[in-house]
Amino acid sequence: MTLFEEVPVTTTREIPVRRVQMRVNGETRAANIEPRLLLAHLLRNGLQLTGTHTGCDTTNCGACTVLFDGQPVKSCTMFAVQADGHEITTVEGLATASELHPIQEGFKDEHGLQCGFCTPGMMLSAKALLEENPNPTEDEVRWALSGNLCRCTGYQNIVKAVLWAAEKMRGYTPASDDAADGGGEA
Amino acid sequence: MFPSRFRYEAPSSLSEAVALLASHDDSKVLAGGQSLIPMMKLRFASPALLVDINNIPDLDQHDAQPDGGYRIGALVRHADLEKSTTLGEHQPTIAAAASLIADPIVRTRGTFVGSLCHADPQGDWASCMVALGGSIVAHGPNGRRTIPVDDFVAGPFQTVLASDEIAVEAVIPAANGSRKGGYLKLERRVGDFATAGVAVALEMSGSTVTNAGIGLTGVGSSTINAREAAAAIVGSPLGDDAINSAAEAAAAASSPRSDHRGSADYKRHVVATFVRRLLAQHQPTEAEVA
């Protein structure tokens, strides 16, 4: 007899597993998951769609925003199992192989980001807004984005980026920042 | 962060849901989940069984009833109320509060009835329901019962719902005359709890107030039903004296704590100011007085 003898580990609690199937960025995906898996973790760790960021993890910051049947939700505040049979859009679903989404173009053109951490969530909230209201006022944009926190930009250029995208999506070519500044020497 | 393990069921009928809840003494209903899931992640709540009611049909409607009352189903999201084009004419207090709940992303998911069941002492909807004299309808194994909101909350984060009952709708009674009112909330930033909030619900016959309710948010250890303040304005048109009495009575009924949101005196002042502002909107015009 020694002072230490290793014994086999036994599990006393049964781990519930459920199969879920959902459309993610237009593709059907299926997985076996534990019900306590959060949607944000399914997307990031399970499906390797790391464009969805987890910021505060406490339902405050909106960085993890994705579209759930077209509506913005905080993916850290939904269980992945709840997405069974539903449609999810993440930031990876915005661009096509060859073209950026107008909202992405807007963020690029208007410098709507600095560190970029909040940007995916911002863009998805913006997408939901513009689908419902293609011609929003500045106030309406600020209102729609008020659940998404940014600690860098002061929001000014984010709002401009969304208004730029709205214009583009309505079929106009928005004036780019360079053109608006006059460009070149005076 | 992730919660402790639980079993998850998403039944497609109320009777199945109630049977599941009854099958386990540590079960919880999941509707919008915007309060429950954060609490589960922080492990303030760790139910063994989660019964998701999102697949149950017919709970997502809110509408005026033939008797003049108004019904809000258990799956009506804050955003449904915020975006409704007809709610304002029936329920101005609810319509005014809808866009002030949490933030736009939480509003797309969180539910009105779920907020009431969460029974956060700082919740905005409870003040509205207290002002309106509303009730919650609970569905259990032995049928339904209607619980007035004043009796519904048993304490912070506690309700009188039995473990096998589901709150299936909130009901607001018919008004004696026309329904007026509003909600004002002071918040430091979008999504914060109210520094102070005031819900006013009036029933008016012409310019005379026939019934009134005033609910206060964030200025006590629970939602406050400012009965004396409401009594001060019933029975006559809204004059300056009556409005001042109501504002003072509401400030006196509140018992705020000084904290990072403001001093107790400041919060009492905000309550009085909000009562004045909300009531002044329904003062008779000079033409009506003459």
Image (cartoon, rainbow, N blue to C red):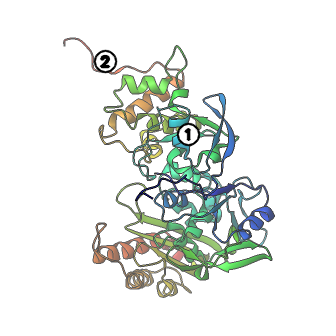
Q: Position of residue A130 (x, y in %)?
A: 54, 34
Disc 1 versus disc 2: distance between alpha carbons? 41 Å
Chain for disc number 2 = A
Residue B175 image-quadrant placement: bottom right
Q: Residue type at mark 1: give it.
A: Leu
Residue B66 position (above or below residue B82): below
Q: Residue at x 56, y 43 (%)?
A: A39
Q: Residue type at mark 2: give it.
A: Asp
Residue at the top extreme of this rendering: A184
B119 to the left or right of A16: left
Residue A115 position (above or below residue B259): above
Residue at the left extreme of this rendering: A186
Of mark 1 and mark 2, the one earlier in the sequence is 1
- The dot on residue A42 is 1
Residue A12 position (above or below residue A158): below
**Residue contact at pointers 1 and 2, CB within 8 angstroms:** no
Viewer can see residue B290: no
Q: Residues within 10 Å of mark 1 (few under 14, many from 20)?
A: some
